[in-house]
């Protein structure tokens, strides 16, 4: 039977369930354009597919929602129950179950930026794992034999470090591993430099740092990979990032 047929009371015409759900789906998708919705996340779950499934609700109503893996991997933060978000998406019917669903293409926390939220979530996660615990920090050697430095060449930071080390430890061996200290490639270069320095048997301590800058300039030192590399380092790591008022995740590990 053609989908365009209209079913009227008292007629013998009928629709299959599949035809009915398809009509509902097509009607929804043709009559409701892209929508922006504010609501609270609940029942958040991530199965092995990597898709995000959750309920978006307010005090009066709720709607099932999904954000597919190919889209959600771009999020800077991790959605969680109780989080107020602004989402963009379209409404459709999930035909196999006959359920109304919001297909989310964009998500942003309400009241706090996604980048800042991601940073706070990372801090809480690392703290819960014990990476910030004072007792796990390794003591600094009194007279180090070899000091590794991970920073950019050509800046004031490296000159300040070398001047200070020559004054305090005139006979120490200093090994510099130059890296980019800001930008997309910086975190992986810092992690690689830390790994490379640990191949030196006489290595006693590592200094990781850079000069001052904006919060964005220092962001590489808030990277989870950098934090875990510092925590896993076999020798003490001194974080010398920015000015005294600047605080990054690298300073906390």
Image (cartoon, rainbow, N blue to C red):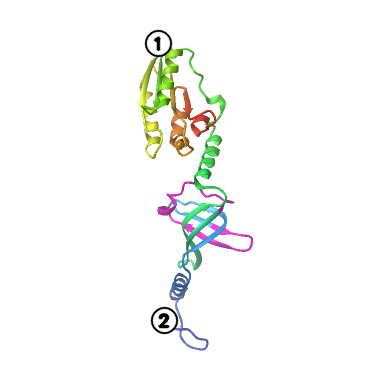
Q: Nearer the viewer, residue 95 or 58?
A: 58
Q: Nearer the viewer, residue 2 or 213?
A: 213
Residue 32 % position (x, y): 48, 69
Up-down relation of residue 4 to residue 228 (above or below): below
Residue underneath mark 1: 171
Q: Can the viewer see residue 123? A: yes
Q: Quadrant of residue 199?
A: top left
Labels 2 & 1 near each other (Cβ < 8 A) = no
Q: Secondary structure at mark 1?
A: loop
Image point (36%, 30%), residue name: 179
Residue underneath mark 2: 4
Q: Which stretch did the figure color magenta?
A: 55-84
Up-down relation of residue 171 to residue 151 (above or below): above
Q: Is residue 54 magenta?
A: no
Q: Nearer the viewer, residue 72 or 183?
A: 183
Which numbered disc, 2 or 1, marks the residue closer to the eye? Answer: 1
Is residue 198 rendered to the left or right of residue 93?
left
Q: Nearer the viewer, residue 179 or 75?
A: 179
Q: Quadrant of residue 55?
A: bottom right
- Residue extending farthest bottom: 10
Q: Is residue 59 magenta?
A: yes
Image point (56%, 52%), residue name: 110
**Which quarter of the rendered picture does the N terminus lie within?**
bottom left
Q: Tell me the distance, in whole angstroms, between the alpha carbons under discs 2 and 1.
A: 88 Å
What is the crowding at mark 2: few (fewer than 14 residues within 10 Å), some, or many (at least 20)? few
- Residue extending farthest front: 156
């Amino acid at each position: 039977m053609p989908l365009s047929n209209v079913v009227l009371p008292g007629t013998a015409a009928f629709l299959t369930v599949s035809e009915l759900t398809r009509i509902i789906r097509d009607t929804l998708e043709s009559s409701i354009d892209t929508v922006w919705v504010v609501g609270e996340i609940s029942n958040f779950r991530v199965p092995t597919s990597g898709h995000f499934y959750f309920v978006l609700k307010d005090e009066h109503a709720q709607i099932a929602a999904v954000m597919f893996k190919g889209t959600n991997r771009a999020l800077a933060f991790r959605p969680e129950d109780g989080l107020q978000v602004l989402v963009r998406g379209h409404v459709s019917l999930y035909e196999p179950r006959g359920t109304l669903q919001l297909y989310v293409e964009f998500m942003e926390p309400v009241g706090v930026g996604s980048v800042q939220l991601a940073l706070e979530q990372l801090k809480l996660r690392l703290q819960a794992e014990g990476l910030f615990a004072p007792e796990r920090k390794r003591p600094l050697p009194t007279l180090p034999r070899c000091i590794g430095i991970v920073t950019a060449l050509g800046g004031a930071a490296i000159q300040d470090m070398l001047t200070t080390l020559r004054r305090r430890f005139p006979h120490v061996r200093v090994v510099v591993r130059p890296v980019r200290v800001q930008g997309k490639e910086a975190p992986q270069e810092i992690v690689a430099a830390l790994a490379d320095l640990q191949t030196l048997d006489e290595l006693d301590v590592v200094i990781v740092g850079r000069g001052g800058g904006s919060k964005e300039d220092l962001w590489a030192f808030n990277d989870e990979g950098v934090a875990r590399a510092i925590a896993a380092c076999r020798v003490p790591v001194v974080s010398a990032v920015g000015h005294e008022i600047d605080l990054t995740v690298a300073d906390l590990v």
